[in-house]
Amino acid sequence: MDSDRTKKIKAAFTKFPTTRILVIGDIIIDHFIWGSVSRISPEAPVPVVNVTGENLLLGGAANVLNNIYALGGKATLCGLIGQDIMGDHLLDLIEKLGSSTAGIIRTANRPTTKKTRIIAQHQQVVRFDREKTGAPQKENLDTMLTFLEKNISSFQAVIVSDYNKGIISSELMAALKKIIKNHPEIPIIVDPKPKDLERFSGTTMLTPNSHEAELMADLEIRDDRSLAEAAAFIQDKLKVDALLITRGEAGMALFEKGKEPFLIPTVAKEVFDVTGAGDTVIASLALARAAGLSLEEAAIVANQAAGIVVGKLGTATASREEILGTLK
Ligand SMILES: Nc1ncnc2c1ncn2[C@@H]1O[C@H](COP(=O)(O)OP(=O)(O)OP(=O)(O)O)[C@@H](O)[C@H]1O
Ligand SMILES: [Mg+2]
């Protein structure tokens, strides 16, 4: 990469600590149970796992927050969790990051969404989820909106992290867009699930993966041409300024209104675990953008960050130092 661009990116990185991002979405706690299997149960044809350890990690929108902190940025999370022990753990983990928990609303209407994975000999044995999905109920929605109205002006970007658990309802999105109307300088960057697309119309930017883009455009992406067609369809239908389609091992493609597509190949050399790469992409993209980089430069940063996390095991994060190391 030319050294002017590297210099500019490096300078923007120094602004991360003073950048405030709002992350709104489905808050999840990832619960991992580790162990080994030495026999099949006499009770049923299932393995018996001898548990050797377990841990709790921030997932979903909370993993986006985690990624922002790993990059040296600051962010606040807004969403719903339960009045349960997992909710307590989640608040603990967020406080440990140094992030405010003021936007996290505890409700008796749903438990804290928890995904438990049992892993033995590096293989997932089973996953079980505890959750209650659905749009926020009126009292919870009102509390979230009051928080947003009061605090929106302290953020330089909004990330919408949709994990299909229901927080990102049409009503919430409509209210968010209305609040942002008075702050046109704040971009809304959305990691969308391809459902009720109208929710996302008029936002600044979407970051679907290829499969999500195919579903959104109802078109199979086979080559660069169909990729561009799908992008044009989505941009036109939803009136978004930009679209970043993440393409797994093929890297990513940025589509900006009135510009040629900008294709970025992946930089990953060894791939261990691709889970959570999408969270890293939207976290680094929003931070880089809020720090004053162009969308192309922000996409380059996001691609480098994603290339780093897929080379690590578990839902991993990338740091500024690691990204700078790859830009040399
Ligand atoms: N197999 C891979 N090889 C190289 N790079 C990868 C691979 N998978 C993902 N990446 C990098 O991570 C970025 C995001 O990955 P992907 O397109 O799979 O997003 P996603 O499906 O939203 O991920 P998630 O599982 O977090 O939802 C890609 O644009 C690319 O830079
Ligand atoms: Mg994704």
Image (tube, rainbow, N blue to C red):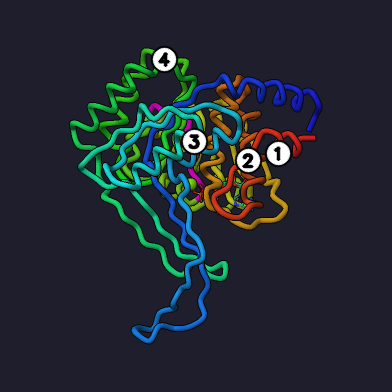
* Rendered position, 46 above or below 326: below
Do labels 4 and 2 touch, CB within 8 Å?
A: no
Between disc 1 and disc 3, the foreground one is: 3
Between the residue at mark 1 and the residue at mark 4, the CA separation in whole angstroms equals 31 Å
Which residue is label 2 attached to?
318
Residue 267 or residue 238, whichever sits in front = 267
The prevailing secondary structure element of the residues shown in magenta is: loop
Q: Amino acid at mark 3?
A: Lys
Give the mark nearer the N terminus: 3 vs 2: 3
The answer to whether residue 7 is magenta is: no
Q: Which residues are magenta?
A: 202-210
Which residue is label 1 attached to?
322
Q: Which mark is residue 241?
A: none
Give the mark nearer the N terminus: 4 vs 2: 4
Between the residue at mark 3 and the residue at mark 2, the CA separation in whole angstroms equals 18 Å
* Rendered position, 129 above or below 207: below
Q: Amino acid at mark 2?
A: Ala
Give the mark nearer the N terminus: 1 vs 4: 4
The answer to whether residue 208 is magenta is: yes
Q: Amino acid at mark 4?
A: Ser
Query: Which of the 4 image quarters holds residue 246?
Result: top right
Judge whether residue 204 can be spotted in this image. no
Which residue is label 3 attached to?
96
Element type at marker 1?
Answer: helix
Q: Amino acid at mark 1?
A: Glu
The outermost residue toward the left is 138
Mark 1 Cα within 10 Å, few/some/many (few <14, many 20+)?
few
